[in-house]
Image (cartoon, grey):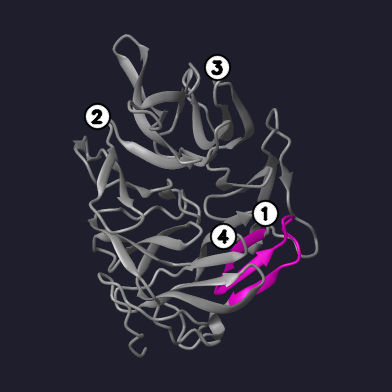
């Protein structure tokens, strides 16, 4: 591959974005690429436990907040993890927003700018006997406040629990729930009410490892039936009990287990799937597949297939996890496809994207074993 047009990582460059050619083999130089924070130890997330839209980088208004699970004090065999933030404007120092004491952070989300975290906890079962579980804290006040935990008699797995979505009224989580009396495990989608006693409602309950990729889109929570891929289902966010989910399949044009909708991104505009080297868009009922991008037709070809990292209005930002030796532009297309627009040239391993009205922000590693940085560029 020929060297890409120069977009320096640590300084501002001045030049204008334009469309890539149809092969994706060239890249335009992009104005105002800035490094907001660097030398970060952000660990790679498992593609089977975390869906394509990252849950680790958020716009809080004046800052970009993110979760670094490899930072902080040593707790047992791992790190406690830290919630960090950098200013959105002029590059500045990385600020530690939160680090648990004696426990380990699991996940981060934002509810209208209010940061929420999942972290490990220990629950006593009988005198001298305890079990690990998960608790949810709000970082919206000066002192972190615990706002939710598993009901008595159950625990949430510290390995297989994460946020789906949160707003000021409700928190939606995906959790492996253990009945402490029988040790039976189920994988559930749970709605937790903010205020009013914090009532919890299980919307979906499946056998262990029976659901994955849960994401909110409009008035539904979408999910797949297996870890990483599988049949697509959806359940209404206001469902009152398990068993009301709908499997989105049909004999013509639908998605079934064999279709393997890899790392799906669910949006009100449709369902975006990786199928081998193609990015395919389905309608919200998992019908009428349309190929938005076919990497097999690009010359040179991307190092890895381009998956959806963020949908913001009609803009689809693609994440291509480039290799240690091969770069690729950070690009966007529209929800109807079309020519790719270069956002930033010569990118490597992009792990998460967010955006505001003026800029797009992303986490990136120069190499798989390198430390990460936060960048921004005009959207």
The residue that mark 4 highlights is 311
**Nearer to us in this view, 3 or 303:** 3
**Nearer to us in this view, 124 or 297:** 297
**Neighbour tally class for label 1: few under 14, some 14-19, many 20 plus, Cα within 10 Å:** some
- Mark 4 vs mark 2: give the one in front: 4
**Neighbour tally class for label 2: few under 14, some 14-19, many 20 plus, Cα within 10 Å:** few
The residue that mark 3 highlights is 197
220 relative to 140 in the view: left or right: right
Does 361 appear above or below 244? below
Work out whether mark 1 precedes mark 4 in sequence or the reverse, and give the earlier one: 1
Q: Which type of secondary structure does the marked residue at label 2 adopt? A: loop
Q: Are marks 1 and 2 in contact (CB under 8 Å)?
A: no
Work out whether mark 4 precedes mark 2 in sequence or the reverse, and give the earlier one: 2
Work out whether mark 1 precedes mark 3 in sequence or the reverse, and give the earlier one: 3
Image coordinates for residue 112, horizontal then vertical, percent:
51, 40
Q: Quadrant of residue 369?
A: bottom left
Image coordinates for residue 37, horizontal then vertical, percent:
27, 57
**Residue at image point 33% right, 19% down:** 130
Q: Which type of secondary structure does the marked residue at label 1 adopt? A: loop
What is the number of the mark on residue 268?
1
Q: Quadrant of residue 169?
A: top right
> Bounds of the magenta span?
270-293
């Amino acid at each position: 591959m020929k060297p890409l047009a120069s977009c320096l990582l640590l300084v501002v460059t001045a030049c204008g974005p334009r469309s890539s050619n149809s092969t994706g083999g060239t890249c335009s130089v992009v104005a105002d690429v800035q490094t907001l924070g660097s030398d970060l130890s952000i660990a790679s997330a498992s593609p089977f436990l975390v869906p394509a839209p990252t849950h680790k980088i958020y716009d809080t208004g004046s800052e970009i907040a993110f979760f670094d699970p490899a930072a902080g004090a040593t707790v047992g065999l791992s790190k406690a993890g830290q919630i960090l933030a950098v200013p959105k404007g002029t590059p500045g120092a990385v600020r530690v927003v939160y680090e648990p004491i004696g426990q380990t952070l699991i996940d981060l989300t934002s509810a209208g700018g209010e940061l929420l975290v999942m972290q490990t906890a220990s629950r006593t079962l009988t005198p001298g006997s305890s079990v690990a579980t998960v608790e949810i804290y709000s970082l919206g006040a000066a002192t972190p406040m615990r706002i939710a935990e598993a009901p008595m008699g159950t625990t949430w797995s510290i390995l297989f629990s994460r946020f789906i979505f949160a707003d000021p009224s409700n928190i939606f989580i995906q959790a492996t729930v253990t009945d402490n009396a029988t040790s039976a495990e189920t994988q559930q989608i749970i709605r937790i009410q903010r205020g009013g006693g914090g009532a919890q409602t299980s919307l979906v309950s499946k056998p262990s490892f029976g659901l994955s990729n849960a994401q909110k889109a409009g008035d539904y929570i979408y999910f797949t039936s297996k870890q990483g891929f599988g049949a697509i289902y959806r359940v209404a966010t206001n469902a009152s009990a398990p068993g009301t989910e709908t499997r989105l399949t049909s004999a013509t044009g639908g998605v079934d287990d064999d279709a393997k909708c890899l790392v799906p991104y669910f949006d009100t505009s449709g369902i975006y799937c990786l199928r081998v080297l193609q990015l395919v868009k389905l309608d919200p009922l998992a019908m009428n597949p349309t190929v938005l991008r076919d990497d097999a037709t690009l010359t040179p070809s991307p190092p890895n297939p381009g998956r959806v990292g963020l949908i913001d209005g009609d803009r689809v930002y693609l994440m291509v996890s480039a290799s240690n030796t091969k770069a690729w532009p950070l690009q966007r297309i529209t929800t109807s496809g079309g020519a790719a627009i270069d956002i930033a040239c010569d990118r490597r391993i992009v792990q998460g994207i967010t955006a505001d009205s003026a800029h797009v922000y992303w986490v990136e590693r120069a190499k798989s074993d390198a430390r990460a940085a936060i960048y921004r560029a005009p959207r």
